[in-house]
Image: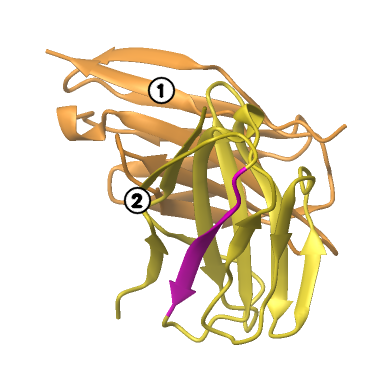
């Protein structure tokens, strides 16, 4: 199993550009989520999904869109990039079969918006 | 409130024990987790504890949970340089499909 994969690893955008961060998992997990990590602030939840066709907002959803057309993929779209979106983005997945919600994280995408 | 709080930095000597502390605010939390993040990497689940437990031990790791004080700790015995990383505490609240993370504690291990 590859686990949770994310692409790209690094990205530089200009203000106003749009892009999609890719996330895929091969563990057949129902739950997938996107976090951003900023210094001194830990991880903050952007959006999450409990299954194909179902998404919901986390703590900091503004400026981001998600969709979940398949169990495996959960892309995160930046509609019009802003410097405040400079961050490291992590995708995570977990099974909903138990109740422990052990989340498996991808390696992250480091995004810089100039 | 929403906060999970951790001290930001801990320095220990190689071979000593490390204790990383965390406080959480919601008594309905069902599971509490410790994650480790090495430089440039994602988060790796170290261990978790169910809220009806007081302690969980896994090799060099010991998790203690004080539900009355909403306090969670991670003890690493015989700390090694490879333990240098950021450690995140997280809680899952009953009825919520998400984890709330603390800001992370950076553990530095020196000779």
- How many residues crowd mark 2 within 10 Å: few (<14), some (14–19), many (20+)? some
Q: Residue at x 23, y 28 (%)?
A: B79
- Decide if residue B52 is on the left or right side of residue A103: right
Most prominent secondary structure in the magenta stretch? strand
**Residue A19 vertical placement versus B100 (above, below):** below
Q: Quadrant of residue B107?
A: top left
Q: What numbered label is drawn on residue A9?
A: 2
Give the vertical position of A2 relative to B101 (above or below): below
Q: Residues within 10 Å of mark 1 (few under 14, many from 20)?
A: many
For the residues labelled 2 and 1, the Cα–Cα distance comes to 23 Å
Please identify the residue farthest to the left as the structure is shown. Answer: B111
What colour do you see for chain A?
yellow
Q: Say if residue A47 shows up in the picture.
A: yes
Say which of marks 2 and 1 sits in front.
2
Instruction: Decide which of A113, B41 is in the foreground and name it.
Output: A113
Q: Residue at x 60, y 51 (%)?
A: A18
**Measured along the vertical axis of the image, is residue A41 above or below residue A50?**
above
Examine the rendering and report whether any part of residue B99 can be seen.
no
Residue at mark 1? B106
Based on the picture, tell me whether residue B5 belongs to the magenta stretch.
no
Q: Which residues are magenta?
A: A17-25
């Amino acid at each position: 199993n590859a686990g949770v994969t994310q692409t790209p690893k690094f990205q530089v955008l200009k203000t106003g550009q749009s892009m999609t961060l890719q996330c895929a998992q091969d563990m057949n997990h129902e739950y997938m989520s996107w976090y951003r990590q900023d210094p001194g602030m830990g991880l903050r939840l952007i959006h999450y999904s409990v299954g194909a066709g179902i998404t919901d907002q986390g703590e900091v959803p503004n400026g981001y869109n998600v969709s979940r057309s398949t169990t495996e993929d959960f892309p995160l779209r930046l509609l019009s990039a802003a410097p405040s979106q400079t961050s490291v983005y992590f995708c995570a997945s977990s099974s909903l079969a138990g109740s422990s919600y052990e989340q498996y994280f991808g390696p992250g995408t480091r995004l810089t918006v100039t | 409130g929403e906060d999970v709080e951790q001290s930001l930095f801990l320095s220990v000597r190689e071979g000593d024990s490390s204790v990383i502390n965390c406080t959480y605010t919601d008594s309905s939390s069902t599971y509490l987790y410790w994650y480790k993040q090495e430089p440039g990497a994602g988060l790796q689940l170290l261990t978790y504890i169910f809220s009806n437990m007081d302690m969980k031990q896994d090799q060099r790791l010991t998790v203690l949970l004080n539900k009355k004080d909403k306090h969670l700790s991670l003890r690493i015995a015989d700390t090694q340089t490879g333990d240098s990383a950021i450690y995140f505490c997280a809680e899952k609240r009953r009825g919520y499909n998400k984890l709330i993370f603390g800001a992370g504690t950076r553990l530095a291990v020196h000779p």
